[in-house]
Amino acid sequence: MRQAIGVVMLVLSWACSATAHVTSTGLATLDVDGGKLLYRITVVATEVDDQGGRLLAEAAGGDRAAAERVAGFPRDYARFSIADEPCQPGRISIRGSSAGEDKVVLEMAVSCPKSAGTLAIRDDWPEVLGAHFQTVLSVRVPQRASVEFAFLEDRRDATLDLAAAADTGWASFVAMGVEHIIGGADHLLFLVALLALARGLWQTVKIVTAFTVAHSVTLSLASLGLVDIPARIVEPLIAASIVWVAVENLVAPAGVGRRWLIAAIFGLVHGLGFASALTELDLSRQALVRALIGFNVGVELGQLAFVAAVMAPLIWASRAGHLPRLPQVLSVIAAAAGAVWLVERLVAA
């Protein structure tokens, strides 16, 4: 059981030292018209690696030297071939978002010697935009439904038969959801704070179910565009929720009986945070529904795996004669980390 306790402490140590929401997502589209391709990717410059983000912002702002460097990015980090024949990059344009949201749009025309066969795609954007950058690509072929691919840290290649019926790419979004929750240190620390005082299976099930239902509701509403709350409001609220629950563990531990209600209330906020990975995708309604289902399933799978790994050692350690003060120690750690994130996000907002 010492190993189990070690797992809990290792996870918390990582969570407190990691930057919350280390994953940033770029939306890409690829329009296929025979041997002519048009590739477009939209990146929020402030959410990616510092150097890469600065270059993108400077290029979009008209800095010629930065624009020359950034123009090479699509050529080097987005490559295509059809029927094993490499495609050649052509004209590249760079522009900023008219909405003033730090978005940078890169567009590249691509010419391929062949127009039929298997389209192969290689995405290497993490090499310049940070190890945790991921791309969601929507491939659009005339007279066919779009196909979506999520390029993750360990999945940089994709293929599409231009003649055959296409897979929907649903599984890619499941993997994306798992990575998003596992890479979201703030969400995981909130779960630890929620469950630190939980005792028994039924209490744990109530808390996890309330949190799951609540964040699924707001994730769906926000992703479908029915709710729109800016990240500058949502992200500080997520950090504040960690502080609230952790402090409540310390000053009002008897409140654990209503913890499921707290989980539901703050779950609504966390769902808006999850939605940030999908709201920028600009997918068709049909494609967005597929992405939403897959992403939500992935988030829940990642969450359940984390809860399963953490709860057993927490319950054991809290018994008399073991480590009965462990919940309080974890709550102090969670409150401190949440306070740091809250200050950082308020300053950044």
Image (cartoon, rainbow, N blue to C red):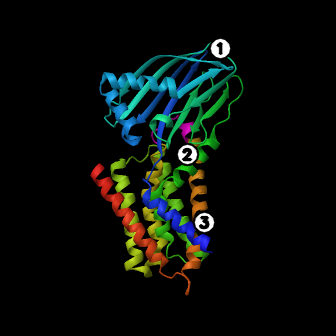
Q: Is residue 282 visible?
A: no
Mark 3 surroundings within 10 Å by alpha-carbon count, few (fewer than 14), some (14 through 19), many (20 or more): some
Q: Which residue is the site of mark 3?
A: 309
Whether residue 285 is in magenta: the answer is yes
Q: Quadrant of residue 159?
A: top right
* Horizontal side of residue 115 vs 329, given as left or right: right
Which residue does the numbered mark 1 point to in the structure image?
114
Q: Which residues are magenta?
A: 279-288
Q: List x then y, in percent, for residue 203.
A: 56, 75
Local secondary structure at mark 1: loop
Q: Earlier in the sequence, mark 3 or mark 2?
A: 2
Give the answer, above or below, for where 280 lies relative to 265: above
Q: Which residue is mark 2?
A: 292
- CA–CA distance in space, label 3 to label 2: 26 Å
The residue drawn where x is 60% and y is 47% is 175
Residue 224 in the image: x percent, y percent?
48, 43
